[in-house]
Image: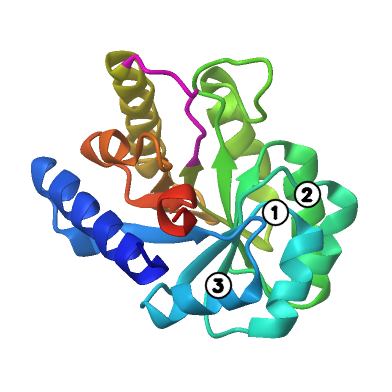
Amino acid sequence: MSIYENIQSVRKRIEGAAKRSGRHPDEIILVAVTKNQPVTAIKEVIESGIADLGENRSQELLPKHEAIGDAVNWHFIGHLQRNKVKYIIPFVYLVQSVDSIALAKEIDKRAGAINKVQNILLEVNVSGEKSKYGFSPDDLVKAVNEMGKLENISINGLMTMAPFIDNTELLRSYFAKMKELFDNLSRARQPNLKMRYLSMGMTNDFEIAIEQGSNMVRIGTAIFSP
C-alpha cells in the first residue's frame, strides 16, 4: 500500500473509534510521526492532507524543517534535552513531551527571548514504568501550579505513552486515567493553562485511546510501513 492508502486506512479507523466514543472524526488530530523518514516520504504525507508532523529528535527535526518549512504544524514528541530547546523553539508549534519543571522553565526562557508563547503538553507517566519519562499522576497538579508563573508557555494539555502490551483492558484503564487527569485540570483556573489536547495513542493502540477520550494520536508505523 502507498502512504496515501495507509493514511486513508488510518483515517477510517479513527472515524470508527470516534463514532464509538460518540464524537465526530474531525475532533481527532492525526500527527504523522516522521522519525527516520526521508523528506520525499514526508512530502507524500503532506500531499495526502496531513497538516501535523511529529519528530522525536532535534537533530532530525532541524534539517526537515529547513527542507519543508512552515507549511505544517511541527510537533516535538520525543525526550527533549534542555540544551536543545533553543534550536527548536523558533518554529515548533507544540512541544508534547515536557516532563519536568526544569524543562518548562528552559522553554519559557527561550520563548521569552523571541517574544513567543510556546504551546506545550505535559507528559505523564501514567503506567509508572521506570523506563519512561513524565510526571507521575500524583505530582501533576503540583507541577502545573509551579508552572503557573511562567509567562511564555501555554499548557495546552497532556500527553502519554502507554506500555506496549496486549492487555486491552489494562491499556483502557491507563487511557481512562489520563482522561480523568485531563478533565480535572480542565476545571482549574490558571492564566497559562488552556487544556485543548489529550495526546495519547500510537499505531498499536490509537483506537482504544480515542475510545477513552484522546483527541490527538501520533501515528508512524501505520502510515509509513509498506
Residue lying at 43% horizontally and 18% vertically, measured from the top left: 165
For the residues bearing labels 2 and 1, Cβ distance under 8 angstroms: yes
Image vertical order of residue 167 relative to residue 162, above or below: above
Image quadrant assignment for residue 139: top right
Residue 106 point in image, percent of width and height: 82, 52
Q: Please name whichever residue, 151 or 87, is drawn nearer the observer in this view of the structure.
A: 87
Indicate the colouring scheme. rainbow
Query: Label 2 belongs to which residue?
Result: 105
Q: Quadrant of the N terminus?
A: bottom left
Q: Amino acid at mark 2?
A: Lys
Residue 175 point in image, percent of width and height: 35, 28
Residue lying at 42% horizontally and 57% vertically, measured from the top left: 223
Region of the chain picked out in magenta, as a range = 159-167
Is residue 161 rendered magenta in the image? yes
Q: Is residue 106 left or right of residue 21?
A: right
Closer to the camera: disc 2 or disc 1?
A: 2
Residue lying at 54% horizontally and 85% vertically, measured from the top left: 71
Q: Quadrant of the C terminus?
A: bottom left
Q: Examine the residues drawn in magenta and state their main secondary structure.
A: loop
Residue lying at 47% horizontally and 77% vertically, measured from the top left: 44
Query: Label 1 belongs to which residue?
Result: 150
User: What secondary structure is found at the residue carrying circle 2?
Assistant: helix
Mark 3 Cα-neighbour bin, 10 Å: few <14, some 14–19, many ≥20: many
Query: Label 3 belongs to which residue?
Result: 42
Q: Is residue 197 visible?
A: no
